[in-house]
Amino acid sequence: MGIFSSIRNAIFGEKDRKPEVKAEPAPSPVTAVPERPAAPAAISEVDVEARLAAMEGADQLNWRSSIVDLFKLIGLDPSYANRQELAEELGRTDYEGSAEDNIWLHRATMQELARNGGKVPAEMMN
């Protein structure tokens, strides 16, 4: 499990994870009427800001804009190695840990949470 998966699971919770789509077996040749595929399940959005704000210690950290404080809030090690691994997972191979890199990493993390069913305020993604 990667760093982003750990972040997503800490915020969304295991019960809120999207179910994995499993391939259906091929229909047997005896079936006369083809079955209709099931409608995709509705994706419920998780309010990322509300979930994080409700965590213990949220009022003492700058998690809304700091990737290091976000890691601390959800109980992950905010080491350079973990932040670099997250950056690589999100498509950036030149992460050096500068302030600009960390701002990018926080925004990219929030954007990825939004793509995975999270409701994230625009100011946390831009």
Image (cartoon, rainbow, N blue to C red):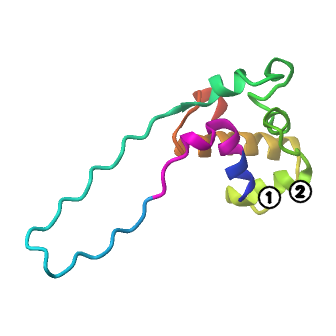
Residue pointed to by mark 1: 85
Q: Label 2 belongs to which residue?
A: 81
Above/below status of 112 relative to 30: above
- Magenta residues, start to end: 7-20
Side of 22 where 80 appears, left or right: right
Tell me which amino acid carries mark 2: Ala
Please tell me whether the stretch drawn in magenta is mainly helix, strand or loop.
helix
Q: Residue furthest left?
A: 32
Mark 2–mark 1 Cα distance, whole angstroms, equals 6 Å
Q: Residue at x 72, y 48 (%)?
A: 6
Instruction: Say which quadrant the C terminus sits in.
Output: top right
From the viewer's perspective, is residue 30 above or below residue 50?
Answer: below
- Type of amino acid at the residue the image marks with label 1: Glu
Report if residue 83 lies within the magenta region. no
Element type at mark 2: helix
- State which quarter of the image contains the N terminus: bottom right
Query: Which of 96/44 is in front?
Result: 44
Quarter of the rendering containing residue 95: bottom right
Under tag 1, what secondary structure? helix
Name the outermost residue toward the top.
Answer: 59
Residue 68: x and y in percent read 85, 38
